[in-house]
Image (cartoon, rainbow, N blue to C red):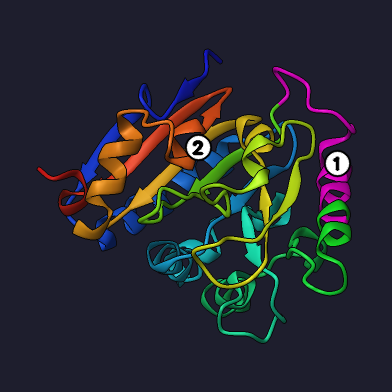
Amino acid sequence: MSGHDVKTGEMIVLADGEAIAQYMARWLTEQALAKTDGPFVVALSGGSTPKRLYEILGSADFATRFPWDRTQLFFGDERFVPATDPASNYTMTRTALLSHISIPPANVHPMPTEGDPAAAAARYQAELQAVYGADTLQPGHPLFDVVMLGLGDNGHTASLFPRQPVLQERRLWVSTCVPDDAPHTRLTLTYPAIHSSRHVVFMLAGAGKREAFAKVRAGDPAEPASHITTEGELVWLLDKAAAAV
């Protein structure tokens, strides 16, 4: 794997958010079925386009075809709120996907959101290390098969927010973030954890994403998402409004 970043990654422009979700459902299923030498490990994203993707994956056409028994579902980030909170990415995913599929409970890894946030991040890193089979990331041995990402108006992705210390984290796989321009303490995957991936897929829909995408695609260093890299392939799934075409 040669590796890619936000400037060199492939752009795929589709009609709208629904088309992105349908495309991603087919592609993700193909990737999962093709992975036969170990578990298929995914970092899920929050947001409206991923929610629609999860609804599709939970539908009859996909739910019985996807190899859930050998899939490990992690989360790219989470707000430090109770699992019952509407702001919880896990709660959204459970409603849209998990309640509709047969997946072993041990294969689903919600981020802990109780107690001390730093301790919760450490517990989540330990879960990742257990699935990975090592305590340090090894080049050529990706942590994730797929990392799904979105993009905020302020250039954040996962919960890598502007001006926050997590942007300088190079050792931990999971860390905390307390944004100064958004509510809630967060847990998030770090740049090194995201880099250890076979595929990073950004899913962006709507004209509201256009300006942030243009900055990140150009590599503007002020945008946290501009610093996303992967050992493998990086793909931008965009609708026409976000891509400005």
* Quarter of the view holding residue 216: top left
Secondary structure under tag 1 reads helix
Camera-side residue: 140 or 192? 192
Mark identifier at residue 239: none
Q: In what quadrant of the picture does the C terminus appear? A: top left
Q: Residue furthest top?
A: 2
Seen at 56% across and 15% down, the residue is: 1
Q: What residue sits 21% from the left and 42% below the top?
A: 13
Whether residue 76 appears in this view of the structure is yes
Label 2 – label 1 distance at C-alpha? 19 Å
Q: Which residue is mark 1?
A: 129
Image location (x, y in percent) of residue 70:
72, 50
**Crowding near pointer 2: few (<14 within 10 Å), some, many (20+)?**
many
Looking at the image, the residue that sits furthest to the left is 245
In the image, residue 132 lies in the stretch drawn in magenta: yes
The amino acid on which the numbered mark 1 sits, given as a three-letter code, is Gln
| Disc 2 secondary structure class | strand
Q: Horizontal placement of 188 versus 160: left or right? A: right
Q: Which residue is mark 2?
A: 200
- Identify the magenta region: 123-141
Query: What amino acid type is highlighted by mark number 2?
Result: Val
Q: Answer whether residue 206 is visible to the viewer in this image.
A: no
Percent across and percent down for residue 59 are 45, 71
What residue is rendered at 57% in x and 49% in y? 160
Compared with residue 101, is residue 166 higher up or lower down, i.e. above or below? above
| Location of residue 18 in the rendering, given as x and y in whole percent from the top left corner | 27, 63
Query: Residue 169 in the image: x percent, y percent?
Result: 71, 37
Quadrant of residue 184 within the rendered picture: bottom right
